[in-house]
Image: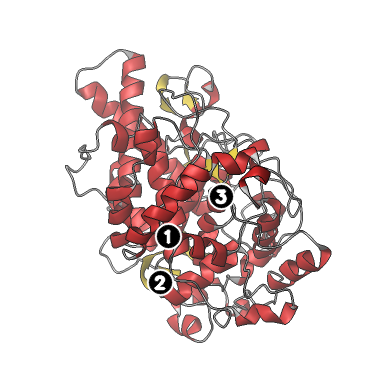
Amino acid sequence: MDSSQSTPHARASCSRRDFLRDAGIGLATAGVAPLAFAHDEHPQSGPPSNANFTRLFPMLPPFAEAHPAVVAALLDIGRPGGMMDANDDLSAGPAALITNPTLSLNNPNADLPNGPAGTTFFGQFMDHDMTFDATSRLGVPKEPTSAPNARMPAFDLDSIYGAGPVVDQLLYDPRDRVKFRIESGGAFEDLPRDATGRAIIADPRNDENLMVSGLAAAFLLFHNRMVDRVRASGETAPDRVFAEARRLTTWHYQWLIVHEILPSFIGASMTDTILRRSQYGRDAGGVPAMPVEFQGAAYRFGHSMVRPSYRANLRGDRGGPFFGFVFDPSAEGQADPSDMRGGARSARRFVGWQTFFDFRDGEVKPRKRIDTTISTPLFRLPLGAMATGDAPTALPQRNLLRQLTWSLPAGQSIAEYLRVPVLSHVDLGDLARYGLGLERRTPLWFYVLREAALMGGGQTLGPVGGSIVGQVIVDLLRGDRTSYLRAQPQWMPTVTGGGFRVVDFLTFAGVSPSGRGQ
């Protein structure tokens, strides 16, 4: 297509395209490709409240059209028992699948020894804080710029704070409006719930499973304890107490993202490179919209890290550990579900965090490697775990259909465009059976997972996945004028004075294992 035939959208992308190509050569050698983002044209003091989705690579064609043969192939790739199914031995039971390492060694769903299981759910919590697509249909092409993002595209904890204590009064303690409601679930506090068990929280997705609901409860408690600290400093005005406690809670959260969570996903070296060179959000003065290459593909790498089962705690189940599959169809309708689904309260349904993060007591368990093998329970999700509540219930099928929803480019196209190493058709030879050329034009989500397995050793994302995930996350932080990385980049956590990690966050919140009999 010559310039006279190019669309206005394509012409608007020329300067970005030229910049990326010029800059890409230097960054490719560092293992990270530079990206640019679409920004709000009207700078604001905070993130936009009605931002739509956008594209990172509008100049690249979709990997395929939404033809019936393509849809059928994607459904087959992601079907239960198909090529992505780990075929975990569920008959061994949930306890054996997390405590017996030989079960991991004998199937393709391998553990990542140095990757704590909890980072999976911290990543899920982050997703709920920055993006929510409630309007698009799986497999039906939709232009991202016409699709609203129901979450503010920033790590501002709006999924916890909602619209604040004046508007969302049900979220807050009626006896002390600057603190959150928190209720007892047995050995540990639980999210507040109504008579049906439904959580009273700003984002209902933060009750999808026991682990993410426990993390959400920890944020409520962290804020409440920060309120006490602000008051102890001498501040008494309720609005200022709330604002300062929220700022400090949010900045500690953002610190964890930058210094612990993101490096665990993309590696410390790539994180450092992006932090040094990514200045798009800061310099452009606007707030980036949410790219569908991130939302619909690259960031969904976390699904590969999910275990088939978890040990929720050590002594919550009549004095013994509570084990359960992450999801189990037989638990549907149970008042006290035997699996890890959310939406219920009982004495055993709390999180003993030493299973999920390393408290140096030998109890931490690993997440799964990042690859194209997905734990078997994720092929039969309960409808309540899906925001739209519709079929299919196999998570891999849903993710693959999203590649058609957003008309996403092939992973190879992005790699070539960014001038980073490209997986060969041999690396993706298991897709050749469909006769559609998917081994050469691979759906981005599948490509990112295979790239992580082959180039990241299953530990971290590869150059395409890592570039998208790392630079979007950093750009969201730098694009928000209220974030610590934008407003005060030299800020240090006040809870520990510097070396702040997730275990310190949980300890300050009061849900660490120390002295609590988890």
Q: Which mark is residue 295?
A: 3
Find numbered disc 2 in the image and state the secondary structure of the residue it sits on. loop
Q: Is residue 362 left or right of residue 36?
A: left
Q: CA distance from mark 3 to mark 1?
A: 14 Å
Find numbered disc 3 in the image and state the secondary structure of the residue it sits on. helix
Find numbered disc 1 in the image and state the secondary structure of the residue it sits on. helix
Tell me whether circle 3 and circle 1 mark residues in contact (CB < 8 Å): no
- x 40%, y 20%: residue: 176
Q: Is residue 506 above or below residue 462?
A: above
User: Toward which corner of the image does residue 354 lie, by quadrant?
Assistant: bottom left
Residue 235 image position (x, y, % from top left): 24, 17
**Three-letter code, disc 1:** Gly
Circle 3 packing at 10 Å, graded few (<14), some (14-19), many (20+), is many
The residue that label 1 is drawn on is 466
Tell me whether circle 2 and circle 1 mark residues in contact (CB < 8 Å): yes
**Three-letter code, disc 3:** Gln
User: Toward which corner of the image does residue 432 lie, by quadrant?
Assistant: bottom right
Q: Which sits earlier in the primary sequence, circle 3 or circle 1?
A: 3
